[in-house]
Image (cartoon, helix red, strand yellow):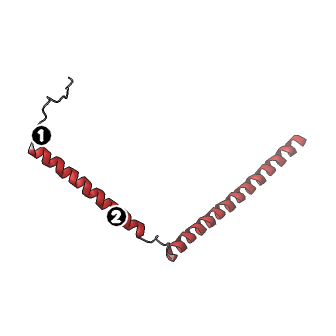
Amino acid sequence: MATEVSKDSKFTLSLETAGSIAVTIAMIVGMWYTLQADIEEAKKLPEPEVSRMEYDLKDQMVRDSIMNTEEKVEKLEEKVDSVKEDTRSINETLLNMNNN
């Protein structure tokens, strides 16, 4: 169903609808100006500083993480050494069995 608009077309708008449209436009314009003012105010504020306490806490967290990783690596190295020893022992046993 197509509607043609021409100079003879009539468009009706109730006062209630016109008022709602006007209020909506006014609210949008008001929010726009408020947002722009907030942006300008934020631009003037100083950069937030990282407090010494925050820096120290982050530094300690990184150090703890490094220490935990180091401990895990040492445990893995011990397990690898144990597996190597077990493998050598098995190889020696097999060689002795084959030689006899």
Q: Is residue 1 above or below residue 33?
A: above
- Residue annotated with mark 1: 13
Based on the displayed image, in which of its 4 quarters is residue 46 positioned? bottom left
Q: Label 2, on which residue?
A: 38
Mark 1 residue type: Leu
Q: Could you tell me if the residues under marks 1 and 2 are in contact, i.e. CB atoms within 8 Å?
A: no
User: Marks 1 and 2, how far apart in space?
Assistant: 36 Å
Residue type marked 2: Asp
Query: Seen in the image, is 86 located left or right of residue 6?
Result: right
**Camera-side residue of 95 and 40:** 40
Mark 2 crowd level (few <14, some 14–19, many ≥20, 10 Å Cα): few
Residue at figure coordinates x 22%, y 55% from the top left: 27
> Quick one: SS at disc 1?
loop
Q: Earlier in the sequence, mark 1 or mark 2?
A: 1
Residue 76 in the figure: left or right of residue 95: left
Q: Quadrant of the C terminus?
A: top right
Q: Nearer the viewer, residue 97 or 71?
A: 71
Percent across and percent down for residue 42 are: 39, 66
Determine which quarter of the picture holds residue 80: bottom right
Left or right, residue 81 beside residue 69: right
Q: Residue furthest left?
A: 15
* Furthest-top residue in this view: 1
Place of residue 54 in the rendered image (x, y in percent of width and height, measured from the top left): 50, 72
